[in-house]
Amino acid sequence: MDTRLGTWGVRLFFVLSGFLITGILLGQRDQYSASGSSFGRAFAIFYARRALRLWSLYFIVLTLAVIVDLRGVRDVAIWHYLFASNFLFVIEDAWIPPFTAAFWTLAVEEQFYLVWPLFVLLLPARVLPAVTAVAIATGTTFQFAAASATGDIPYMYLLPPTQFDALGAGAMMAIWFRQTGRFPQALYAAGALAIPAYWLTAMVGGGRAVLETITVLPMVAIVAAGTIGVGGRAGKALEWAPLRFVGRISYGIYVLHLIAGLIVTRILAEFDVAMERGPLYFLVGSVASIAAAGISWVLLEKPVNGLKRYLPYDPSTTAGRSNVIPPLNGH
C-alpha cells in the first residue's frame, strides 16, 4: 500500500484550500452584506483575484509546451486549458503527458471554485455547516463506493468528489473559527492519534479509501496549528527567510517542477549523463525548480499579483482582505 508523503501533501493542500477559500468568501459575505453592495461584484472580485494568482504562469507554461509540442501535449492540450486534466487522466488511465501529472490538483481546485462560492455567498449562513457536513460525508462515501466498484485504482482519486472530505473539512474549520475564534482541543488529539492509525492501517493492508480518510485528521490539525500560530523553536524555524521565500514561490514550484526535471534530464543526457529517479535526481530537480520558480515570481507572478490592489475584497476600501486569517501564498 502506498504510504508516500505525497498523498499527505495533497490532502493538506485541499484542507488548506477549503479553509482559506471559505474564510475569504465568508469575509466577503459579511463585508458586502454590511455595505449593501451587490453579490455579483463579490463573485467577480473573487474569480478575478483567483485568475490573477493562478492563470498567468499556468497558461504561459502550457502554451510554450504546446508550441514545441513537448511530449505530445498538443493532442490533449484542450483538456489542460479547460482545467480538466484530472478527467483526462481518469479516462486514459495514464498521465498524458507525464509532465502535466501534477495539474490534476489545480483542476480539482478550479472545479471547486466553480461551485463553492455559490454556496457560501448565496445560502443562508445557518445552513452552511450542514451543507459542509454533507460535502464531507459525500467525499468519504464516494471514496469507499468507488474503491469497491473499481478495485482501488489510483486514478479514481483524481475525481472531484474524492476530495470533498478534505475541502469540506477545511471549510468547516473556517466556519468554526469565524464563529468562535478558536479550535477544539480534541482536534489536535485526533490529528496526533491519526498518524499511528494511518501507518498501522497501511501495515495490515487497509484499503486506500481508509487511508485517505484518516489523513484528513492530521492535516486539519496542522492547518489549525498554523492558524493559531506555532511558538518556540519550531515557530522561529518557520520564520526563516529562505523558507518563507520558498513558500512565497511555491505555486511556481508546483507548476514548473516536473518540466524542470524533464529539461535538466535532457540537458544532462546531451553530456552523456543519465540520471535515474532517486536522491540525486530529487536534489538537482529541486534546485532547478526553485530557481525557475524564483525567476517566475520576480518577472511574472509578483507584478501580476500586484494588480490585486485594484480588486479589493472589501467594497469600501482599496485593499480589502478576508478577516478570518490573512490570505497565504496562492490565496
Image (spheres, rainbow, N blue to C red):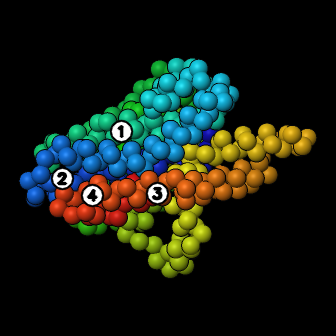
Which residue is at the front of the view, 257 or 73? Answer: 73
- Ranked by sequence position, the earlier of labels 4 and 3 is 3
CA separation, marks 4 and 1?
Answer: 22 Å
CA separation, marks 4 and 3?
Answer: 16 Å
List x then y, in percent, for residue 323.
26, 64
The disc labelled 3 sits on which kind of residue? Pro
Q: Which quarter of the picture shows residue 143?
A: top left
CA separation, marks 1 and 3?
Answer: 26 Å
Reply above or below: 268 against 287. Answer: above
CA separation, marks 2 and 1?
Answer: 18 Å
Dot 3: element: helix
- Ranked by sequence position, the earlier of labels 4 and 1 is 1
Q: Quick check: marks 2 and 3 in contact, CB under 8 Å?
A: no
The disc labelled 2 sits on which kind of residue? Arg
Q: In this view, does 262 lie to the left or right of 215?
A: right
Q: Residues within 10 Å of mark 2 (few under 14, many from 20)?
A: many
Can you identify the residue that label 3 sits on?
303
Q: Is residue 209 left or right of residue 135?
A: right
In percent of the image, x 30 and y 56: which residue is there? Answer: 310
Q: Residue 312 carries which label?
A: 4
- Ranked by sequence position, the earlier of labels 2 and 1 is 2
- Ranked by sequence position, the earlier of labels 2 and 3 is 2
- Report whether residue 105 is seen: no
The disc labelled 4 sits on which kind of residue? Pro
Can you identify the residue that label 1 sits on?
112
Q: Which residue is farthest right?
A: 272
